Image (tube, grey):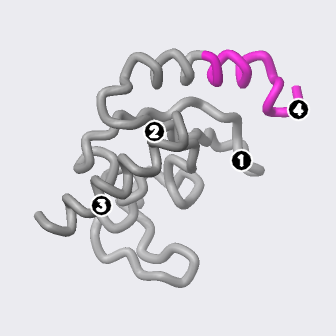
Amino acid sequence: MADRAALYRRAVSFFADFDILICPTTQVTPLPVDVRWPTEIDGRASETYIDWIMITYVWSILGCPALAVPAGRDRNGMPVSLQIVGSPHSDERLLSFAARIEQEFKHGIFCGG
């Protein structure tokens, strides 16, 4: 609990300077449907499902609202997304920002279209 509290304080400090964090939703492109999770990412082992979704899981345990918006396709045509994260209790601002980003992608502004 002490580690979680310290991480929460760091997140709150970060969001004191930044309204929104935009980051990858996952560390790898979409996997084949029969693969539960990648066993390795960039040379680092993923022993459990939580290991590879930590980039999303961490926001849930900190109480930070987060969502993913479609962000085009990878070089193999598979869909990819961006994760947008806000400070605790900033759900309305986060949803508004995410809607704007989604519209930009829809109109091809971020995808070269």
Q: Which residue is mark 1?
A: 74
- Per the image, label 3 sits on a secondary structure element best described as helix
Is label 1 in a helix, a strand or a loop? loop
Magenta residue span: 100-113
| Residue at numbered disc 3 | 7
Label 2, label 3: how far apart the Cα atoms are? 15 Å
Q: Which residue is mark 4?
A: 112
Image marks 3 and 4: residues in contact by CB distance under 8 Å: no
Q: Is residue 107 magenta?
A: yes
Asked if residue 71 is positioned above or below residue 105 in the image, the reply reads: below
Task: Give how far across and how far down residue 85 sits, in percent.
Answer: 45, 38
Label pair 2/4, CB-CB below 8 angstroms: no
Say which amino acid is labelled 2: Val
| C-alpha distance separating marks 3 and 4 | 37 Å
Q: Could you tell which of marks 4 and 1 lies nearer the N-terminus?
A: 1
Q: Secondary structure at mark 2?
A: strand
Nearer mark to the viewer, of 2 and 4 = 2
Q: Earlier in the sequence, mark 2 or mark 4?
A: 2
Q: Which residue is mark 2?
A: 85
- Give whichever of 13, 26 is nearer the camera: 13
Q: Nearer the viewer, mark 2 or mark 3?
A: 3
| Distance Cα–Cα, label 4 vs label 1 | 13 Å
